């Protein structure tokens, strides 16, 4: 009987505490959901290895935060916003998930963050590209961590125009992301004094690019830009190499290129390709040390998304520890107040629109002679300072920014 | 430079040639489907997966055993053909004589399983396969740069297509095949091992797909999902040509490659839909397909 009484009292007490103060960890567990494409086009840039990165962060943190267990659940979003919505809804409404990480396809992220906003839970977006995620689609419930289309369009096109690539031909994946990328590139190229001489909108996905490459070749443009991603980009680059595009003096500009893509292409085909990245494993001792551990755990070198998942999970857990709470707003506020200094970013900071701004890098793919190993792929040519890389808040359409 | 509808003639020639190259792939793949459907009445939804296996096999043979392209050109189709025979013997045989939908669902299931398992091992970014040294480079035709490899694809694919058509329509073995599917019992009575013939026919259809896969390995990214993209298009080609018509599949394959190539020049966004548009029109006018026999 006394046992029963004790239980009841503590239950009532804890209920009161949860209702009263937010400085509590709900259910005595910090539950994290990992949502990503685990089997489709975007599998290799995040996917199962992203889950590994998240688990590495939790293990490095000690497996517990303020005495509360840290638990991870994961699901395959199949690149479908519908699957994402229903999974996230189940997680936050029925299964007590506090934070959702991963989040790759932009459409998936936009759907998932809506549910997170309704339920006041937190989302840490590491894989998505669309800059609209912290612009028209911003919410007080998510943070966009690694990169976005705005940052990518600043990096590569500016550099190429300044090197003398004045006329551009764009191959665009015919859907929202491709159109956004094309618009961003056009803006940057024209601002730097370049000119767009033509573009083609190709179906998504396109297995054979020979026809489009031929047309781009015939245009005589200095630069052929690829406003597409994943298999479309690698297919286009392979075909361009086969048709002797670079030998004939035209430059290929990949706009969304991940380490996993370059690894698949190999240096023979991808050499000389310029790209913008948020992180590269072989930049300094800190990145190398982490990448070595990642290689041991997964058999592959990490992409910028994998590193971002590790870093953002770590930042989240630190914020939970500092505030003693897993309430979304408390944690987000704490994360915004804490500069990010780890192997992923130096002096990174999270703005009120949820954009994590940090230095980006312009990289060039090594030649087979320069490359000393399977994963020795990039030369970092230039650092793009955080202020230059991301959309200034003064241009923001985000509802959280007073403009 | 002379222009046709605002497109320079030179570009148009280039697109026609590219269309024929892609058409050669469609022809090889739809030929395999037509053989399997025409002779066995099996709707082989695993055809894309077999194409993928052919390409994967080529890459893996090289990576693990150092076997070069020329050997793989024969070895990979044989290995994948054996996989086909196993599928026929252990699975398809059990549903022989049932409605078409059973073979469709069964082969679709097999395709999904193969795709899923291989994705687990190899990811989806694509495996690397270098162009054989013989085919490095290309020739300048004046209106376009033609990589040597693409020229080789046209020649060898069309030769294999013609050879297959000849074997089935004009030789004794072909007549056994056709007779065996018309009246299996009678052929058994003549002392011909019909079940073996069926296994071999399925295996042969699969070999054609795998052969296309080997041809694709140096120019397309080799991934476990590469077959699923092309499968639906190839089915449309077979339907346009007339289900089961061997010659129809070849001619339609090349034709559709050209139609698609031209669409990519004049209105690129429609290029992935144009084949299906043709399919709808053909089915409305000739429900049995361009080369199908009237029912």
Image (cartoon, rainbow, N blue to C red):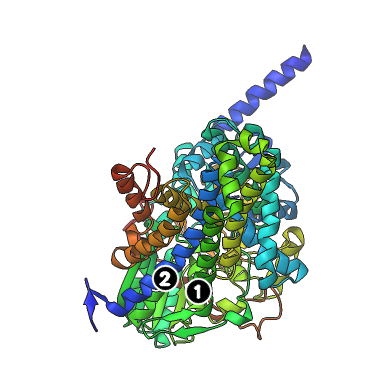
Residue located 51% across and 72% down the image = B155
Residue bearing the label numbered 1: B150
Q: Are marks 2 and 1 in contact (CB under 8 Å)?
A: yes
Q: Chain of mark 2?
A: B
Under circle 1, the secondary element is: helix
Numbered circles on residues, count: 2
Under circle 2, the secondary element is: helix
For label 2, count other residues whose C-alpha is less than 10 Å away and answer few (under 14), some (14-19) or many (20+).
many
Tell me: B118 left or right of A122.
right
The image shows residue A363, relative to residue A59, as above or below, that is: below
Q: Position of residue B162 (x, y in %)?
A: 51, 62
A249, B220: nearer the viewer: B220
B5, A77: nearer the viewer: B5
For label 1, count other residues whose C-alpha is less than 10 Å away and answer few (under 14), some (14-19) or many (20+).
many
Q: Position of residue A239 (x, y in %)?
A: 49, 73
Residue located 54% across and 49% down the image = B35
Q: Residue furthest top?
A: A1
- Place residue B180 in its image quadrant: top right
Give the mark, 2 or 1, whose residue is nearer the N terminus. Answer: 2
Residue A253: mark: none
Query: Residues under labels 2 and 1: Cα distance?
Result: 9 Å
Residue located 63% across and 43% down the image = B110
Q: Is residue A379 visible?
A: no
The image shows residue A185, relative to residue B195, as above or below, that is: below
Q: Position of residue A231 (x, y in %)?
A: 52, 62
Q: For the N terminus of chain A, which image quadrant?
A: top right
B13, B118: nearer the viewer: B13
Residue B18: mark: 2
The image shows residue B201, relative to residue B151, as above or below, that is: above
A230, A28: nearer the viewer: A230
Q: For the C terminus of chain A, which image quadrant?
A: bottom left
């Amino acid at each position: 009987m006394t046992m029963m009484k004790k239980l009841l009292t503590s239950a009532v007490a804890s209920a009161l505490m949860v209702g009263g103060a937010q400085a509590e960890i709900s259910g005595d567990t910090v539950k994290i959901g990992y949502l990503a494409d685990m089997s489709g086009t975007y599998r290799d840039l995040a996917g199962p290895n992203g889950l590994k990165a998240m688990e590495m962060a939790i293990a490095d943190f000690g497996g517990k935060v303020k005495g509360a267990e840290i638990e991870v659940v994961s699901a395959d979003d199949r690149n479908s916003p519908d699957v994402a919505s229903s999974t996230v809804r189940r997680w936050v409404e029925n299964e007590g998930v506090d934070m959702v990480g991963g989040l790759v396809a932009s459409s998936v992220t936009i759907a998932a963050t809506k549910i997170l906003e309704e339920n006041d839970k937190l989302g840490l977006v590491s894989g998505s590209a669309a800059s609209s995620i912290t612009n028209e689609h911003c919410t007080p419930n998510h943070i966009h961590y690694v990169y976005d289309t705005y940052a990518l369009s600043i990096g590569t096109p500016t550099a190429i125009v300044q090197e003398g690539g004045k006329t551009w031909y764009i191959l665009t994946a015919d859907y929202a992301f491709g159109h956004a990328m094309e618009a961003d590139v056009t803006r940057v190229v024209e601002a730097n004094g370049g000119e767009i001489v033509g573009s083609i909108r190709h179906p998504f996905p396109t297995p054979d690019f020979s026809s489009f490459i031929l047309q781009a070749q015939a245009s005589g443009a200095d630069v052929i830009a690829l406003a597409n991603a994943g298999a479309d980009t690698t297919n286009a680059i392979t075909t361009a190499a086969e048709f002797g595009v670079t030998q004939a003096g035209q430059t290929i500009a990949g706009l969304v290129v991940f380490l996993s893509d370059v690894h698949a292409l190999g240096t023979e085909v991808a050499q000389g390709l310029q790209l913008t990245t948020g992180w590269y494993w072989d930049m300094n001792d800190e990145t190398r040390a982490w990448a070595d551990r990642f290689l041991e755990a997964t058999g592959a070198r990490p992409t910028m998304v994998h590193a971002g998942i590790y870093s953002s999970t770590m930042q989240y857990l630190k914020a939970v520890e500092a505030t003693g709470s897993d309430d979304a707003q408390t944690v987000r506020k704490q994360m915004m107040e804490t500069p990010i200094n780890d192997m992923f970013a130096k002096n990174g900071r999270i703005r009120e629109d949820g954009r994590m701004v940090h230095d980006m890098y312009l990289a060039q793919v090594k030649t087979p002679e320069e490359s000393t190993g399977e994963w020795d792929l990039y030369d970092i040519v230039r650092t793009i300072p955080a202020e230059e890389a991301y959309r200034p808040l003064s241009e923001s359409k985000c509802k959280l920014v007073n403009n | 430079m002379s222009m046709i509808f605002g497109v320079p003639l030179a570009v148009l020639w280039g697109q026609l040639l590219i269309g024929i190259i892609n058409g050669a792939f469609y022809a090889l793949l739809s030929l395999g489907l037509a053989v399997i459907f025409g002779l066995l009445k099996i709707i082989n939804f695993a055809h894309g997966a077999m194409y993928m296996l052919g390409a994967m096999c080529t890459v893996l043979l090289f990576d693990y055993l150092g076997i070069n392209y020329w050997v793989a050109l024969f070895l990979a189709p044989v290995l994948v053909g054996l996989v086909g025979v196993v599928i026929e013997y252990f699975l398809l045989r059990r549903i022989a004589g049932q409605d078409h939908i059973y073979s469709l669902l069964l082969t679709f299931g097999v395709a999904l399983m193969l795709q899923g398992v291989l994705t687990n091992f190899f990811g989806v970014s694509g495996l690397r396969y270098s162009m054989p040294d013989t085919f490095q480079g290309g020739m300048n035709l004046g209106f376009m740069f033609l990589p040597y490899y693409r020229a080789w694809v046209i020649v060898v694919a069309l030769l294999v297509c013609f050879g297959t058509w000849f074997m089935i329509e004009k030789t004794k073995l072909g007549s056994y095949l056709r007779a065996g599917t018309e009246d299996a019992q009678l052929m058994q009575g003549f002392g011909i091992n019909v079940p073996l013939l069926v296994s071999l026919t399925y295996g042969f259809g699969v070999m054609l797909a795998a052969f296309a896969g080997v041809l694709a390995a140096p120019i397309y990214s080799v991934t476990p999902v590469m077959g699923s993209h092309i499968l639906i298009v190839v089915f449309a080609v077979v339907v346009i040509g007339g289900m089961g018509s061997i010659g129809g599949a070849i001619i339609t394959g090349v034709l559709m490659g050209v139609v698609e190539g031209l669409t990519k020049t004049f209105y690129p966004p429609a290029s992935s839909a144009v084949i299906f548009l043709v399919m709808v029109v053909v089915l409305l006018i000739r429900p049995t397909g361009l080369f199908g026999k009237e029912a």
